[in-house]
Amino acid sequence: MFDVDYTALEKGLELMGVGMLGIFTVLFLLYLTSIFLIKSFPQKEGKDISE
Amino acid sequence: MESFVGGLLTVTSGQIVMMLIGALLIYLGIKKQYEPTLLIPMGLGAVLVNIPGSGLISQEINGQTQEGILDVLFDFGISNELFPLLIFIGIGAMIDFGPLLKNPFMFLFGAAAQFGIFFTILVAIIFRFNLQEAASIGIIGAADGPTSIFVANQLAPHLLGPITVAAYSYMALVPIIQPIAIKAVTTEKERKIKMHYQAESISKTTKILFPIIVVLVAGFVAPASLPLVGFLMFGNLMRECGVLNRLSQSAQNELVNLVSILLGLTISVKMTADQFLNVETLLIIAFGLVAFVMDTIGGVLFAKLLNLFRKEKINPMIGAAGISAFPMSARVIQRMAHEEDNQNFVLMYAIGANVSGQIASVVAGGLVLNYFM
């Protein structure tokens, strides 16, 4: 039914793989970093910059 | 006499259709309040640029090219990405990352809900768009107008008009699209899952360091995302640092308002009948819907996948809030949870996922651009 350009489709699949992997990598790193920040700079204990 | 009715005699049916589309955008903006800040200027812009001999766009008169002011603005603010980036400073100044930092696990839902972007790229390729065009169309699924403009302008500037219209229209239609998509892939029992909310306060130090760290992480993984991420986080740093309140307020109000006025009007340069009225536009509008639906489904299915391994179950609707349309998506999820069980409060989790979607969408835009570099 469709005259599909398989080379472009292959590239699209590659972009999908790279893109989703990249997004999850960045967001997972930010997840880990956030946990580190929250543990390292709790609002209590006088560790906050605002105190 | 002829000179007075010349415009009326030379107007084409395509131009009339475009003026009607412009009128429809104005109607949707005013009556339905669908993204009025963009749809109203775009709507009037579509009328302006389709009047024959319009002095607003560049044209040849007696063999000489006369520059139109909208084309001048386009070169000044959109060709070089200036307007979308300035809007990002304002958006960054508006975002409170607190709900996300209180539940960092929500970061992952922002990532999962970008699935629609890449799914739509494949669909567009199947319909014979080339890879760059398909990527620009897929970015509608970022549910983030400035990111769509930024990416489309670099990869497929000729499709900027329909992509922008689709991106902003579907963002306004999130309250209609998402419930249908969510109900299609969840059971009533799943939608009733309650989540215990543990409110932790976030220190100012964390809030200040966070935008800087986002810039570093996103910058090293996807350097092409830095214009977007960098400006977004600059705005957020102004908000959180506590010593630039005046600038933060200006970014949230005056800057965003001024640029929005010019952005909407300027994009209409790409809404002339000859550029807009074709089968491609109809396909792009349809693909935009596919992108939003698949974003929603991607987020929900990811939450369901996580539930297979978790003791404390997540309400899978939270996954759908991982798109960038803030705060509409979070509100939709809370409303749906409340409809299923009036004692179910998932708003803070949904807001966390929604804010994560704002970061994920700009990272997605950067990664797509990175691929073509």
Image: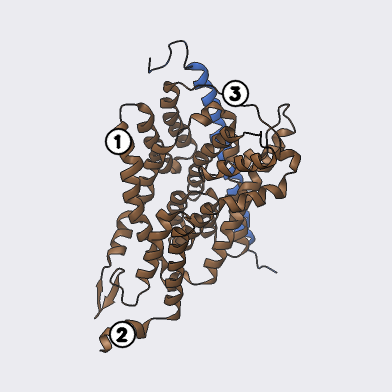
Chain colours: A blue, B brown
Residue type (three-letter) at the residue carrying disc 3: Gln
State which chain disc 3 sits on. Answer: B
For label 1, the crowd category at 10 Å Cα-Cα, with few meaning under 14, some 14 to 19 and many 20 or more, is some
Write down the residue under mark 2: B6
For label 3, the crowd category at 10 Å Cα-Cα, with few meaning under 14, some 14 to 19 and many 20 or more, is few
Can the viewer see residue B278 in this picture?
yes
Write down the residue under mark 1: B247
Q: Quadrant of residue B52?
A: bottom left
State which chain disc 2 sits on. Answer: B
Picture quarter with the N terminus of chain B: bottom left
For label 2, the crowd category at 10 Å Cα-Cα, with few meaning under 14, some 14 to 19 and many 20 or more, is few
Marked residue nearer the N-terminal end (1 or 2): 2
Q: Position of residue B132 (x, y in %)?
A: 51, 57
State which chain disc 1 sits on. Answer: B
Please tell me which residue lies in front, A18 or B112. Answer: B112
The answer to the question of whether label 2 and label 3 lie on touching residues, with beta carbons closer than 8 A, is no
Task: Tell me the residue at 37%/42% (across/down).
Answer: B90
Looking at the rendered structure, the secondary structure element under dot 3 is loop
The answer to the question of whether label 3 and label 1 lie on touching residues, with beta carbons closer than 8 A, is no
Write down the residue under mark 3: B198
Marked residue nearer the N-terminal end (2 or 3): 2
